[in-house]
Image (cartoon, rainbow, N blue to C red):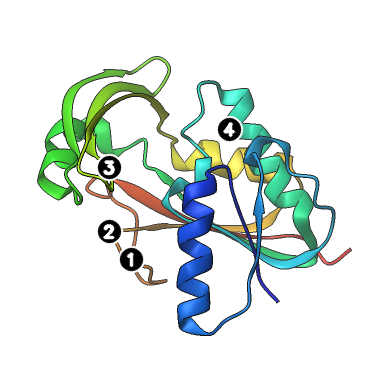
Amino acid sequence: TVTGADLSESMLNKASANAEKAGVRVRFLQADARKLTFSREFDFVQMICEGGFSLMETDEMNFDILKGAVNALKPGGRLLFTTLNGLFPLFHSVKDFINENSAGGTVSRSNTFDLMTMRDHSVYEVVDDSGQTLSLECNERYYLPSEITWLLKSLGMVSVTILGCPLGEWKRDIHLTTHDYEMLVIADKPVI
């Protein structure tokens, strides 16, 4: 049994159409990830493409997303998510990375990485489904591995594993480096 949640009605419609086409049943809910009300309902929670986490304007909002995901897990459940790797912008240009690896017409016009807040303020141009160019202002938080570990342990999670996550590659044998734009995080909720 699978439940999918997203804030965007249009993304939920696409997901529903894809699930129907694949012949699978998924319960889709329109929900704000900062305000999830699940409590010990799932064996596994997955947030991919940051799943909203790290994309909010404040650290408190990001923490609310993480807290909601942990609360949704049954004892013994597992959380898997990707987040922006705080080691990456210390050694690389985020703007160059986005422009070299974007799909679907996304172009980064400006980036300002703030070392004190670990936030990248940027303006992206994105071509929507109808071919119209939109300008999006983003404020994204990059996390250091030690921060993620601390956040998860403060929520009672155990056995936190952080791996490198080259775009589209999820494997347990990829060690995190400064070259990884994202990191893959796996954490378990204690059985008791």
Residue 79: image location, x then y, percent: 62, 60
Residues at marks 4 and 2, CA–CA distance in whole angstroms: 22 Å
Pointer 1 with pointer 2, Cβ within 8 A = yes
Amino acid type at mark 4: Asn
Give the mark nearer the N terminus: 3 vs 1: 3
Q: Is residue 76 visible?
A: yes
- Of circles 3 and 1, the one toward us is 3
Tell me which amino acid carries mark 3. Asp
Counting residues from the start of the chain, the first of labels 1 and 2 encountered is 2
Tag 4 near tag 1, CB within 8 Å: no
Which mark is drawn over residue 166?
2
Query: Which sits earlier in the primary sequence, circle 4 or circle 1?
Result: 4
Numbered label attached to residue 133: none
Q: Which mark is residue 174?
A: 1
Nearer-N-terminus badge (4/2): 4
Q: Residue at x 72, y 44 (%)?
A: 68
**Residue 10 x, y percent position in the rendering:** 48, 49
Q: Position of residue 90 (x, y in %)?
A: 25, 30
Badge 4 crowding class, 10 Å Cα cut-off, few under 14, some 14 to 19, many 20 or more, is some
Give SS at disc 2: loop
**Do callouts 2 and 3 mark residues in contact (Cβ within 8 Å)?**
no
Q: Amino acid at mark 2?
A: Pro
Distance of label 2 from label 3 (alpha carbons): 25 Å
Picture coordinates of residue 77, whole percent (x, y): 73, 66
The residue labelled by disc 3 is: 128
Please state which of the two labelled residues, at mark 2 or mark 3, is closer to the viewer. 3
Cα separation between marks 4 and 1: 25 Å
- The one nearer the camera, 19 or 188, is 19
- Left or right of 59? Residue 100 is left
